Amino acid sequence: MPALPDTHFELPERVSTATGAGNAQYREQVKRRRSNKKRIIENPLAHLNDEQLEQDVSLFQRECLPSVNRASLLRAARVAQNVRSYDEVARSEDPETGNHLPVQLTVEEKRALKAEKDSLFSQPSMLMVILAVSLAAFLQGFVQSSINGASLYADAFHLTDAISAATGENARPFWDHWKLGAANASPFFFASLLGCWLSLPVNDWIGRRGAMAVAAGLIFASSWGAVFCSTWIQLFSVRIINGIGMGLKAVSTPILASETAVGFWRGSFILAWQLWVAFGIMMGFAFNLIVSNIRNDKLVLQLILGAPLVPSIFLMIGLCFCPESPRYYMRRSIDNPQKAYDILRKLRKTELEEYSHNFENPEGFLAHVKGYAVQYKQLFKERRLRNALISSSIVALAQQLCGINVFAFYSGNLFIGALEGDEKGRLKSMGYSLGFGAINFFFGLPAIRTIDTLGRRKWLVLTLPVMCIFMVAASLSTLIGDKDTRVGIIALFVFLFTAAYSPGMGPIPFTLASESFPLSHREAGCAFAIAINLLFAGLIQMFFPSINAGLGDGGSLGLFAGLDFLAFVLVFLLVEETKRRSLEDLDLIFAVRKRDFVSHQVTRYLPWFVRHHVLRRRRDEPKPSLYVDLIWQQQQYQNGVGGEGGIDWREPFAVDDGGGVDANGHGSDGMVSPTFPRRPSEFDRLSVASDDTAHQ
């Protein structure tokens, strides 16, 4: 509805609310979405009474969706304004429930409302989006396996010293290690330095689907060129093109999944990106192992380097059947609500309400460039954007520094350094790499659904300490004297580390990057976070051969174990929970001051956790909660508490991860489970006692 979009930080000249009071309330909401000092999570339509809602719908229908029936649009808007009440009506077995409400739901509508929150695949029409996202991710993983496998044939590029087992006490980094690192790092460096940043103008001009098609074409061209490379400089140059495509795809694909998914299951849909990256890595390793049996090493190398040609072709074909993101058509430079509505009808098969604002479109190349620069500048100036940038960048950086991509990029070299550097050792190292890829994929499957029920943050704080322990164990295992025993034990702990990584640190960085920013800054914020991720992936590619040659396997693994612990501390202190929130609700989550969030974690949640789970005392003490949830929160009315028909606001709310209950026992987002045991909504008490002007 026109009441409030994904927050644009410059108010439009024409606000669609019908009255002066409505304009003031609208501005109050926009202000809170920039700086949410009261930590209130509310419905963006909450400040409109029924008359204002009707006027807004009429204006919106007349200016933006003239082909849509006004009564149907108003009906959808009323349901959206009081979504919790209508959700309870849909779940009630009493057919008389909700008869006093302005909208009477049909049986089919009740079924759809329930399925949207209870069923992960309630929208079968999302299949083509999932297929396109999966193909793009598969291509990404296959490219990584191609880089990994080609590293074992570095002598074909005259880098003979790069494949020597330069580990142990007498290890010395060779100049060839740097050359191999540069050739392997070039796609990630240029994805970070060019591809990610170009995603903003490319997405602006041709959309998410168009950007993915351009990326597939660039990777196709670079893979074809790599087949004919004979020096490391040629390989370095060709992979620059690959990197630009990789950056475009890494930003655009998760955004497409995020913007088309049902809000309550957004994490599981974005999870398709990381899950199929892992599957691509696994299949790439399997392909490398199969073709390695060919006796012609030059042909083997050409097949490994050219293999990404095939998935890039499939991606281009799949994009022909994939719909564009409806939110792309709501951008200020496109402003086509009718097109967005038509796509939503195809994706949801229901009549949905949408919202629109009028913006002045920039004219001319320099105006576009200036507009893009302003977006990046605002990422650091506006609290809501800055907080999202901090959280998504921390998790994106942690993914690279945890050590997983050491195994994704150099598992072959790492294992061949512990084995004999002959043909037999090469085959064994490829076998270990295949095992790594398989575990990365299959242990990512538990994150389906649980990334939206358990949550992003909780997966991270549960798995990072375990990853640290397994990495320490792998590091200490390098001290074992017997070679066969040593390699087996190291492989065991590497596989256990990968199993802990896959459902947590694997999918969550790209999930957070694609969902944390408002529509106006989504590409810019996502590009920044993913650029950090790919930049450090390139640095690892560049420097790990020399680090490993200097520190040895044990020292290198120990270094990453320390970084895992550092990542756990940063996630615990600084990363908010985003599960089961709409993209618009996240404006209010990230508008809360970061220091308030940190203070709550240290002074309220951590002491509660120690008392409740460590000391096992005060078991009935409810979890502290940070946010005042006026959308899904259980409102407890009682005489003499909080005033007549009011809410007890006597104690501040707090939350560690968006879940649990507050200090008074009130419910919060964590109370919303997939099965949704509902509470009385007190629908007739629409005006609750509150010091928030939007609810007075």
Image: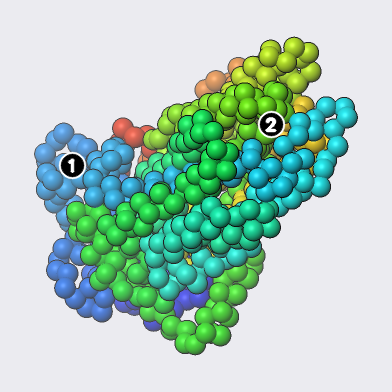
- Against 16, residue 487 (above or below) is above
Residue 66 is at least partly visible in this image:
yes
Q: Is residue 99 left or right of residue 426?
A: left
Q: Position of residue 484 (x, y in %)?
A: 68, 14
Residue positioned 33% across, 62% down in the render? 324
Horizontal and vertical percent position of residue 563: 72, 37
Q: Amino acid at mark 1?
A: Arg
From the viewer's perspective, is residue 22 above or below residue 558? below
Nearer to the camera, 667 or 267: 267
Q: Label 1, on which residue?
A: 111
Task: Please give left or right for residue 308 compared with residue 313 in the image.
Answer: right
Specify which label sits upstream in the sequence, 1 or 2.
Answer: 1
Of marks 1 and 2, the one in the foreground: 2
Residue 596 visible in the shown view: no
Residue at the (34%, 35%) spot, across then down:
674
Q: CA distance from mark 1 to mark 2?
A: 53 Å
Q: Secondary structure at mark 1?
A: helix
Please, which colouring scheme is shown? rainbow
Tell me if residue 449 comes above or below residue 316 in the rendering: above
Q: What residue did someone put label 2 on?
A: 414
Q: Nearer the viewer, residue 332 or 111?
A: 332
Q: Residue at x 43, y 41 (%)?
A: 276
Q: Position of residue 421 (x, y in %)?
A: 70, 28
Q: Residue at x 67, y 19 (%)?
A: 487
Q: Amino acid at mark 2?
A: Leu
